[in-house]
Image (cartoon, grey):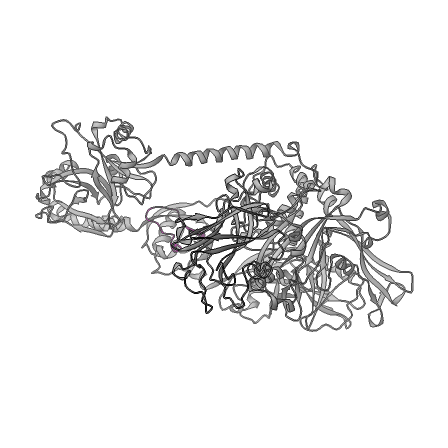
Amino acid sequence: MDVKVDRASPIEEKPLAVEEYHSVDDVEWMTKKLIPAIPDLEESACEIFQWHIKDWRALDKRVTGPEFEIGGYKWQGNNAPEQVAVYLDSAEPKEQSDPNWHVCAQFALLMSNPQDPTVYTSHHAHHRFTMEEADWGFTRFTEVKKIEQPLDHRGLPLIDQGHTVITAYVRVYKDPTGVLWHNFINYDSKAVTGYVGLKNQGATCYMNSLLQSLFFTNYFRKSVFDIPTADDEPSKSVALALQRVFYQLATSSNSVGTTELTRSFGWNSLESFMQHDVQEFNRVLQDNLEGKMKGTLAEGAIQKLFVGKMKSYIKCINVDYESSRVENFYDIQLNVKGCKTLRDSFANYIDVETLDGDNKYMAEGHGLQDARKGVIFETLPPVLHLQLKRFEYDIERDAMVKINDRHEFPLDIDLADFVIDGEEKQKAGPNGFKYTLHGVLVHSGDLNGGHYFALLKPERDGKWYKFDDDRVTIATMKEVLDENYGGGEPTENLAGMTMAMRQLNRHKRFTNAYMLVYVRDESMDEVLKPLTSADIPEHLQRRLDDERLAQENKRKERDESLLYFNARIISDVDFKAHDGFDLFNPLVPSAGKTLKVRKQDTFATFREVVATSYGLSQDQVRIWTLVKRQNDTVRTDLPIPDTDLGTTMETIKDKYGTRLQADMKCYIEFLDQPSGSPNAKPALVPNEAQNGTIMIFIKYYDPFTSTLEGAGKLYVHKTAKVGDIVSTLNERKGLPANTPLKLFEEIKPTMIEPMKMKSTFQQSEIQGGDIIVFQKDLTPKEYGNELSAKISDLSAQNAKVGIPQHYEYIYNRIIVDFKPKIDEDGTLKTYSIELSKKSTYDQVAAKLAEKLEVDPLHIQFTSASTPNGLPKNAIKRLTNLQLQEMLPPGYVHHGVGPNVIYYEKLGISIVELESKRLIKVTWLGSTLKDETTLDLLLLKTSTMSALVDALLPKIKLEPNGTQKLRTFGVFNGKLIKEYGPSDPISAIHESLNIYVEEIPTEEMDLGDDEQVLNCIHFQGDVTRTHGIPFRMVIRDAEPFSELKARIRARLGMNEKDFAKIKFVLFQNPGRISPLNDDDVLDVEFGPGDAIGLDHIDKSGRSNRLGVEKAITIRG
């Protein structure tokens, strides 16, 4: 490397204040003070080099010092005399051919007095020296005017008689990951590591980390490929979408997107910005895939890979009695709090609880007995997913908290001690439960947010890699283990840390492992067996190869588009057919023609192409540019002259077009005679000829048909009178020469001004490209006494008598699509109706009623939501409500749809309907699974008694039931209120779900020794409630296993789904206890006590406020 003094550097530091006099030659002190070793980095060399400059004034403007070597790398320094700028320069790039070459160094540069090396100034920095950034240093090392002045009170300068010394301290670090101090500009994960990452959609890093782990569980990946998906659509099939992600991860050179996958889950873009629990996501995903694998080659793969068995037991100490249950598990949740190591967590998991004293166990046939209660593993799966409980509910705080305690986990672990002695353990052999770490999934942050990434070891004897969304880097063992144990440095050690080191420690404290993946040693070859092309479905390869080819073609088209631009061509024909503002409607893509124009083609070529497209010769057309004026109207501007025939179209566009627009807009004028003939129309210059002739556009309005059309162009002299063109206009429309006309200038949509016949065009401020609109003058002279009747007829037909009124109409004109809100029999249609934005509610209803052939008052409208266009809110009928208020803000376009309103045909008048309230009531049958949702229309003054009366004819009560109904309101799975018969329905809040059920017989016939206890559903933590709360009768001395059977019957759940529920008992104040089959609920319950059912919310109906939404996968 070199030391040099010259140009600017982003790193600027002030000289260190010298408190003690230390020589620049004091290596130990200088390295400790200026370049202290950076924790966690491995040093390869730390040395000093000095450059003695004998004659400072004789130096060139830029000078490079002698080359030296430190750490196996060559360096040199340089210096500039005007502004003292000193740099450390790597001399290696001169000899390097590897574009990825780099060396990481921490360095200090010092300038000192040659006689007294304690007189010095210094700067220090660290840098990743690369081919692009081979030098790094300090532009303002010191001021030139100061270097020959005394530095301090000792009176010695940095330069003494032209002599000074520049010293470089350089500490070189090893870079095992290849990304130390990397800026990641143009970083290529595939080139560096051989792997690619996954793009983050907003908050999908939790999903990305798990997907990468599953991808590198090769047996799982192959099983996913074995699911038949040839006829599936990626956006509707989770299996196919996951196959595509896995295939792209294996073959793509760039990071892979997951939008298609989340779309197959049934998620919208909002759900992609919500972080979820990885364990929950993993369970829901595998549950979905397990269903897809049934009846295929992949059937049983998930069970084989991830499912183990554990035994829950209660064993009496003094009698020979044991109660036990064996159940499957897909992952293991291990405590972090109170456990220093992973082995401690396993020991805690199988820890035995002694039931004695007041807590003795009621053993069947033996009465109350001392007993031991616990769980133990019967067998462990080939792939262990260990969920570390970093997020827990804190009873004292009544909130979820993150546990950041230090928790160590090993590279290898033998779990045989936690497996029960028996047939399975004997079959596995002495090494059957030895596992090796395969993956560490990490969360960095707190409870309210953070970031997820994964550290994975794809091959048995390979390297570790960090998969951080779209970036993949090599990882060190320190990154895999130490940096993810959590905890950070003890508080007492913080005092001796720098601010940067404290910030690093804070980051470490909140960065820790939350999921570990271990693979059984004896199964590793099978689990990590590499896939071959034969393992990948042919249709998948074919589809993605075709898509890549299509993308490549699109890329080529984009590249080609740099050579072309589009020209929008509007002709006389388009103007004649146009029935709105301006010369054409720029918002309608079909108006005119769009031609692809090569930038390097000449204007002559372009004109010939345009003329040929209209079946004309190029001498029969004249091309004008179109511009948008300040009042937002589009008019002709300049005719492109023949002098530009040899000019390229790129230049033409820049010269005559609008720079802000990507395309070029042109108007094509058809000439009656070739432009070179004696009778040709005048060759115009911008807007008007030199003799004052201008070209104006003419439109004609017929009030009897309410039609507006283009009527061609006229060439007029600016000094001519407006009335002079009347005969020409009559002739053009085939009207008698003396027909009286009214003329208006179309200035802009909201400004249609009448013109005075006796004024000149110049006095009327008419310029080239302006538009004049004319119509017959409806006067008594022409129509006699019939005029009033004709005008009345026009008004009755909703026709516009005059041009201003018609322009006002077309300004407010929109097309509205009226769609049926509910169409159960498929007979209702969508009607597209032209209306004015100022139409009233009743006028809109009348127009639609004509189509439906119903009374307008028997129609109810519902607004469409933006952006999805689905039905939103019913529109209340108000006589002064206008159509533009019925459409959502920003939904009204000038003549361009779609504008949507939903409609319903009512059996009663809207007037009657709006005096009532529609309440959705869910009737619960004999099980909570038997739901029927009914719409009840009640007077707003009704009570709950009227609600029940309205419901009774629509439901069927059990013949032997109590015939007593209970009505209650639920919000987010919580019981909010139980209603009495006299409660008004106005007390029902819009956010509540209303349920009605028949009170069970056992609840009505409650015995003296029985209690009623509420039951609630939740997921993971008690704040995440869902489903329908219910009540159960608690019987005296009844084992919980029997109560569970009654709960299952009440829920109507199948055995498989019910087995996944975990039960807890909530007791005030804040006590939560797990419930086991042999427990007996013989305590006195108080208000707020409840049984909790912990299971996944599969309904997808949760609408939690401030609480994480449950994960659902529907594809």
Percent position (x, y) of residue 1020? 66, 59
Residue 115 as seen in the image, left or right of residue 237: left
Viewer can see residue 1113: no
The answer to whether residue 431 is magenta is no
Which residue range is magenta in the image? 887-908
| Residue drawn at 76 percent across, 45 percent down | 521
State the count of labels: 0
Task: Check the picture and name the quadrant holding the C terminus.
Answer: top right
Viewer can see residue 1023: yes
Does 298 appear above or below 907?
above
Percent position (x, y) of residue 887? 39, 54
Does 821 appear above or below 13?
above
Camera-side residue of 384 and 600: 600
Q: Main secondary structure of the magenta part?
A: loop
| Residue drawn at 13 percent across, 36 percent down | 731
Percent position (x, y) of residue 46? 59, 53
The answer to whether residue 905 is magenta is yes
| Residue drawn at 63 percent across, 33 percent down | 537
Residue 935 as seen in the image, left or right of residue 677: right
Camera-side residue of 251 and 673: 251
| Residue drawn at 62 percent across, 41 percent down | 239
Residue at the limit of the structure toward the right, as seen here: 319
Residue 768 as seen in the image, left or right of residue 961: left
Residue 301 as seen in the image, left or right of residue 585: right
